[in-house]
Image: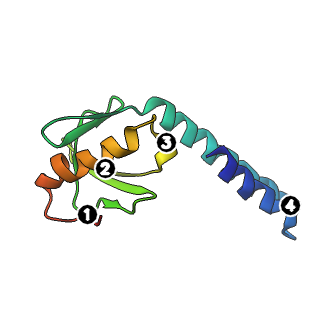
């Protein structure tokens, strides 16, 4: 995550933009990195046997049919008990060793039973 934000920030060096615009874009990239790191540190993904999950302290969340498993990345879409919707992109390196396989199996067998074949494997 840090590398991708670093690449985006370094791309600003090659653009012929006014200094103020470059500084603003750099600040936006830095802010994005900070928010992503904070979200990653606070977000523990707890999978339940009933096909729901918990993300940090956000309560129980239900996987939506728009969740897509690309193999190399996963777009996880959810609906909370309070009607709040959310989405997150996960990559294999965002999970502990062995966690990627466990998550994909859980999505297919536990959460997949609750959605109508909305995922592509």
Categorize mark 3 by other alpha carbons within 10 Å: few (<14), some (14-19), many (20+). Answer: few
Determine crowd level at label 4: few under 14, some 14-19, many 20+ residues with C-alpha closer than 10 A: few
Determine whether the residue tagged by mark 3 lies in a helix, strand or loop.
helix
Establish if 74 lies above or below 45: below
Residue designated by label 2: 104
Mark 2 vs mark 3, CA separation in Å: 13 Å
Task: Please give the label number shown on residue 13.
Answer: 4
Q: Residue at x 69, y 48 (%)?
A: 3
Q: What secondary structure is marked by label 4?
A: helix
Q: Are marks 1 and 2 in contact (CB under 8 Å)?
A: no
Residue 37, horizontal then vertical, whole percent: 57, 37
Q: Secondary structure at mark 2?
A: helix
2 or 3: mark nearer the eye: 2
Q: Earlier in the sequence, mark 3 or mark 1?
A: 3
Residue 55 can be seen, yes or no = yes
Counting residues from the start of the chain, the first of labels 2 and 4 encountered is 4
CA gap between label 4 and label 1 equals: 40 Å
Looking at the rendered image, the quarter that the C terminus falls into is bottom left
| Residue depth check, mark 3 versus mark 4: number of the one nearer the observer | 3
Q: Which mark is residue 94?
A: 3
Residue 80, placed above or below residue 7: above
Q: Residue at x 24, y 38 (%)?
A: 53
């Amino acid at each position: 995550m840090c590398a991708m934000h670093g690449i985006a920030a370094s791309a600003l060096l090659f653009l012929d933009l006014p200094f103020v615009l470059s500084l603003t874009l750099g600040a936006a990239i830095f802010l994005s990195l900070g928010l992503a790191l904070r979200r990653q540190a606070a977000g523990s993904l707890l999978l339940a046997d009933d096909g729901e999950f918990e993300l940090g302290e956000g309560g129980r969340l239900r996987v939506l049919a728009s969740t897509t498993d690309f193999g190399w990345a996963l777009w996880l879409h959810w609906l909370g008990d309070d009607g709040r919707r959310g989405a997150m992109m996960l990559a294999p390196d965002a999970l502990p060793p062995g966690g990627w396989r466990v998550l994909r199996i859980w999505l297919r067998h536990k959460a997949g039973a609750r959605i109508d074949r909305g995922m592509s494997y």
